[in-house]
Image: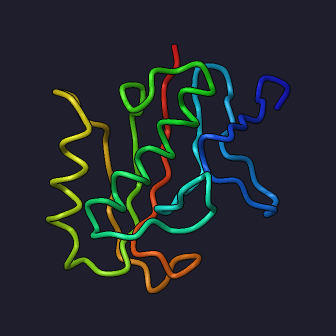
Amino acid sequence: MSDAHRIRTDDAPNTDNPYSQGVRAGDTLYVSGYGPVDPETGEAVDGDIEAQTDRVLDNVAAVVDEAGGDGLADVVKITVYLTDLEDYDRVNEAYGARFGAVPPARVCVEAARLPEDVRIEMDATAYLG
């Protein structure tokens, strides 16, 4: 893993857990899963699922930016985890508003529970070539 290096930014939530916010290996960036946590307060944002979706995407974009990328424009794959698939359509609206003509490939799964009991989490892969 000599070509891989850790990405760290104060613009995305940090934890004491043993993982990196992101890892860049060559031109590929792997972004850890983020919930709707405000990096300044360390708390989940109040608001509806759309506001929470925006916060998650802001966190992902911050890690991509720190790695030298262009925020969400460089994201090629996202996994969305929802605790309630009833939120699916509303998440799609907020999510779709953040991407251009070529949105990333995506998987969406329902999870029984997410850390800190948030309703949504996403991880991502970005291409920084």
Residue 12 vertical placement versus 86 (above, below): above
Q: How many marks?
A: 0
Q: Residue furthest right?
A: 2
Residue 86 shown left or right of residue 40 in the figure: left
x, y percent for residue 27: 59, 20
Residue 33 versus residue 11: which sits nearer the camera? 11
x, y percent for residue 128: 52, 19
Residue 89 shown left or right of residue 18 in the figure: left
Q: How is the image coloured?
A: rainbow
Occupied quadrant, residue 41: bottom right
x, y percent for residue 10: 68, 41
Occupied quadrant, residue 120: bottom left
Q: Residue furthest top?
A: 129
Residue 105 shown left or right of residue 37 in the figure: left
The residue under the point 58% across, 36% down is 63
Q: Residue furthest front?
A: 41
Q: Looking at the figure, which quarter contains the N terminus?
A: top right
Residue 42 vertical placement versus 55 (above, below): below
Residue 35 vertical placement versus 3 (above, below): below
The residue under the point 45% across, 21% down is 70
Residue 95 shown left or right of residue 31 in the figure: left
x, y percent for residue 84: 30, 81
Residue 97 versus residue 18: which sits nearer the camera? 97
Residue 73 vertical placement versus 56 (above, below): above
The residue under the point 41% across, 55% down is 79
